[in-house]
Structure formats: structure tokens, C-alpha cells
Image (cartoon, grey):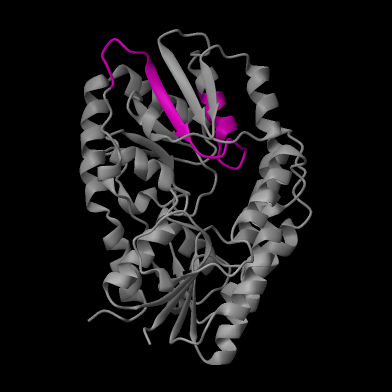
Amino acid sequence: MKPVSFVAYGDIGSQPGRDITELSRGLYRRDLLEQVYCRGIETHDLPKHLVTTPIPLGRAIPRAMTGINRYVTERFDKRYYAEQLFDTFAARAVEETEIQLHHTPGYLRTLRAGNSAGSRTVVKATTEYSKSFDQRMAQTYRDLGVAKTPPKMTGERSERRERTLRECDQILAISAFVKRSLLAAGFPAEKVSVTPLGVDATDYQESQERDDAPFTALYVGSVTVEKGVPYLLAAWKRNQWGKDTDARLLLCGDISSTMQELISQYGFENVETPGFVDPRKYHRDASVFVFPTLSDGFGKAPLEGMAAGLPVISTERTGMPDIMSDGREGFIVPAGDATALADRLKELREQSAVRRKMGKRALETARKQTWDKHAEAVVDALGLSG
């Protein structure tokens, strides 16, 4: 029997589930993987017997829940109920191994089954400590004067995430930012290791920005308050670019109703919202990748932007400070600071030579931050190297 069972709510072989797929591959190549328990399967090159989907009908029921959340009511907390469904069946399916590794916190039944069986339970912390985040975001909504109607089960989901982190034997934080939030919440330092994510730079075509093209700032992710998009809009307004035909702002991702209303209030003529898309077709013509998030455990999207040779503007509340240096591959700005964001956007627009130099450095850095490097960091943290 191999030492690691990997419990991962996500679709192996999919683009959103890339980190699940790549870590599974890394463990398999090192002859450490006993089984992957995942939500669904798109495609993969692992032996079929190593991949199990515990939920009856695979991902059909979770996808139906997503449809309710997206098209019927945002108040339906599809993630909470889908996670509970997965946890129920994964707890019954998972077999005893030396290490039970969870891709995200929250699967309390499965974790307790592992603890009872004598496995060492390890949870990847993929977001900032949830209670700190919830408190800060409540204040942010008040400061912005925006109403927030969180899904009904948000508190219960946060509580389950906390309990898995408290009850597991070891935590793998995906950034130093996440680790700091956990230490501030009282988790012992010896329980938490940092294992940054990776990227496959060969998947991304290098930016082909033309000299005669508009300056294009690209954002990819959920278009929400939590991702700092209101501050990006404020920065765009501060620079007086809202009607500038030589500038574009692309906000790629699902848009919350709150943000739809806010964007329309600005009346910008050069802000585009293509929706949930494959970002690679937009990297090609972009000038800069901007990621103003108020909290992101790591932030795969800006690293993917770097892999496309784009300079990145990100915040300190991500994993980007673990990967890039302020002023080298782009800029790190304080989260929620529209003025700093506006200044850095303006600097990169006005200094094309600096922008392109930073983009080349970003690509060089991304090429070194491979998925195998991430797998090796996880293996080291688990004490399985050598």
C-alpha cells in the first residue's frame, strides 16, 4: 500500500482542478499515491484504478446545485451543500492509509474517519483563516456602502473548515499569507508548512501586445467585492480612463449582482465583461495582468498571467509575494488601495519599455515555479522525501 490518499473536491483533469491533477501526478510519479477521491473526472493520465468519485452520479448533482446558485438565487450556498454531499460519501469510501491528505479544509466526516483509522491527517489551507476574512469583509461592505446578503450556510461552512484545521495533524498553507493568518488565529507554528502552487508555463502563449493596440488591463477571477474589483474600478476612474479609446479594462469571470450594478453606475465605455472564459485567449493581447484581491489564498490567475509574459499588479494578500518581487516582475500594492493601484497602472501604461521588461522577467519566474516544484514541497512537508 502506498502512503498517501488524496481527498480533493474538484474535477481531476479540468482547468479549475489543475492543482488537484498536478499534485496527484507528482505523488504518483514518486510512487506515493494510493488513491484520489475527487468530485468528477474530465480526463487524466493516471491509472484508472487510482481515481475514485465517491458521489453517486459523479459530478451531476453538484453541477445541478451550481445551476440553482447561478440562475435561480445567489442565496443558495451550493458549495456548502455540495461539499457536505462529497464529505458524506468520501467518508464511507476512503480506505486506511498512512497519510490522508485533504486538498481543502471542510470535510470533517472524512477527516474524522481518517483519525479514527490511525492515519496522519493533513489539510491544505487554501484560503486565509475564514473568521478573519469574514470579519474584514463585513467591514469592507460597510465601508463601500454595499449591501451583502451572504448565503445562509456561510457561518456553518466556516465552522466546519475551522474544525478540520483544528482536528488535523498537519496543515499545508499554500502561501505565507495564509500561514500568517493561521498563526494570528492561534495555530502552532510547528503545525503549519508553506507549499506554494505552481504553473505549467508551456500552456500559455506569450503576450503579443502590439504597439498600436490600446493599453489593456486584464483581470481574471470572480468579479466580486472580495476580489477587490470595486477598487480597480475606482483606480480606473481616478486615472480618468473611463472614456479613453486607447485603454481597455477586461473583467473576465462570473459577475455578482452587486458588481453588475456597481459597474453600470460608473458608465465606463471601455470596460468589458466577457464572463467565464478561457483566459488564455485574452492573455495574448493584454498589456498588464491586474489582481486587486482583498484576500486570496494563493492566486493562480496572476501566476498564469506571468506565464503569458505579462507584468502583474497584485496585493500582499495573495501568494504572489512568495513568487515575485515588487518592482521586478510587476508590483505588489496594498489591498484596498485604489490610489496605489491607479499609480501603478499609470506607470505601466506610460512606460512601455519597463512594462515589457517586467513581462519578460515574469515569464522567467513563472517557468521556474513548476507544478513538480509544488509536489516536491508537499512531499518534503509530509516527510516523504528520499
Q: 243 left or right of 377?
A: right
Residue 144 position, x and y percent, is 68, 34
Q: 50 left or right of 151?
A: left
Q: Is residue 369 visible?
A: yes
Residue at the image point whose x is 46% and y is 25% from the top: 342
Residue 137 position, x and y percent, is 66, 47
Instruction: Answer above or below: position of 293 versus 160.
Output: above
Residue at the image point whose x is 44% and y is 82% from the top: 99
Using the image as rendered, state which of residue 143 and residue 293 is in the foreground: 293
Quadrant of the drawing holding the C terminus: bottom left
Instruction: Answer above or below: position of 89 versus 114.
Output: above
Using the image as rendered, state which of residue 323 and residue 98 is in the foreground: 98
Instruction: Answer above or below: position of 301 versus 56.
Output: above
Q: Is residue 195 visible?
A: no
Residue 47 position, x and y percent, is 36, 69
Residue at the image point whose x is 27% and y is 20% from the top: 351
Using the image as rendered, state which of residue 364 and residue 41 is in the foreground: 41
Residue 172 position, x and y percent, is 44, 69
Residue at the image point whose x is 79% and y is 54% from the top: 152
Tell me which segment is drawn in magenta. 209-235
Quadrant of the drawing holding the N terminus: bottom left
Q: How many marks?
A: 0
Q: 88 left or right of 191?
A: right
Quarter of the image for residue 378 reads bottom left
Quarter of the image for residue 141 reads top right
